[in-house]
Image: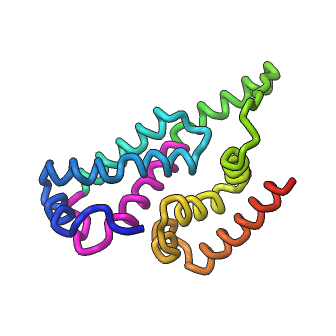
């Protein structure tokens, strides 16, 4: 994925320029919400937006630590990923309570979606484990390179390739059924 902001904007942002922050925010907000929603489809859209907002607050508060000579994309997605998992830890109790209630009252969720290819793709993506889903989302939806994904997740490039390979294989299998 190509950088969405210039080196000048990154430098001004790291110096605390609010106009530069606005430009960064506008460039990455939608991407962040989409990434969060794809990574955690069980999150409500408001939760996704809150997580992205929290990420931007953290990034702004820690802006002096950001090296404006480095790409912003991996920095942003790593920060967002960390906040997603923090949100998961914070909501673990609530989610467990919901699951317990669902089991206790035998609630049934009915899927009324159409059988078009996009829905099948989403269903196949959601059927993957979190590791495979994250690698595929970062690669094909956010357009990041294998090396950037490895840096964001904190694993080797070969592991990223393996997760993508087996995730795509599993998706193909589930879409053929």
Horizontal side of 19 relative to 48 (left or right) equals left
Q: Residue at position x 76%, y 41% from top?
A: 115
Rendered view: 157 above or below 35: below
Seen from the viewer's position, the closer of residues 110 and 66 is 110
- Measured as percent of width and height from the top left, residue 47 is found at 48, 36
Q: Quadrant of residue 168?
A: bottom right
Q: Main secondary structure of the magenta part?
A: helix
- Measured as percent of width and height from the top left, residue 121 is found at 69, 52
Rendered view: 81 above or below 70: above
Q: Residue furthest bottom?
A: 158
Residues shaded magenta: 63-88
Q: Is residue 83 magenta?
A: yes
Q: Residue at position x 69%, y 44% from top?
A: 119
Seen from the viewer's position, the closer of residues 19 and 85 is 19
Rendered view: 46 above or below 63: above
Rendered view: 29 above or below 65: above
Horizontal side of 134 relative to 78 (left or right) equals right
Q: Residue at position x 37%, y 64% from top?
A: 73
Q: Residue furthest right?
A: 177
Q: Residue at position x 31%, y 53% from top?
A: 27
Question: Where is the N terminus found, in terms of image quarters?
Answer: bottom left
Q: Quadrant of residue 77?
A: bottom left
Seen from the viewer's position, the closer of residues 66 and 144 is 144
Horizontal side of 58 relative to 164 (left or right) equals left
- Measured as percent of width and height from the top left, residue 57 is found at 29, 46
Q: How many marks?
A: 0
Q: Is residue 95 magenta?
A: no
Q: Residue furthest front?
A: 116
């Amino acid at each position: 994925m190509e950088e969405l902001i210039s080196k000048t904007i990154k430098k001004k942002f790291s110096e605390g320029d609010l106009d530069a922050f606005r430009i960064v925010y506008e460039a990455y907000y939608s991407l962040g919400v989409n990434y969060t929603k794809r990574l955690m489809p069980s999150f409500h859209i408001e939760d996704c937006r809150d997580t992205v907002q929290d990420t931007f607050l953290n990034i702004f508060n820690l802006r002096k630590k950001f090296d404006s000579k480095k790409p912003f994309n991996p920095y942003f997605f790593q920060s967002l990923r960390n906040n997603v998992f923090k949100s998961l830890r914070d909501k673990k109790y609530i989610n467990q309570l919901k699951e317990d209630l669902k089991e206790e009252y035998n609630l049934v969720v009915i899927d009324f979606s159409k059988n078009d290819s996009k829905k099948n793709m989403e269903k196949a993506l959601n059927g993957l484990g979190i590791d495979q889903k994250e690698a595929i989302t970062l690669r094909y939806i956010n357009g990041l390179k294998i090396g950037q994904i490895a840096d964001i997740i904190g694993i080797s490039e070969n592991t990223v390739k393996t997760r993508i390979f087996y995730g795509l294989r599993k998706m193909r299998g589930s879409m053929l059924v």
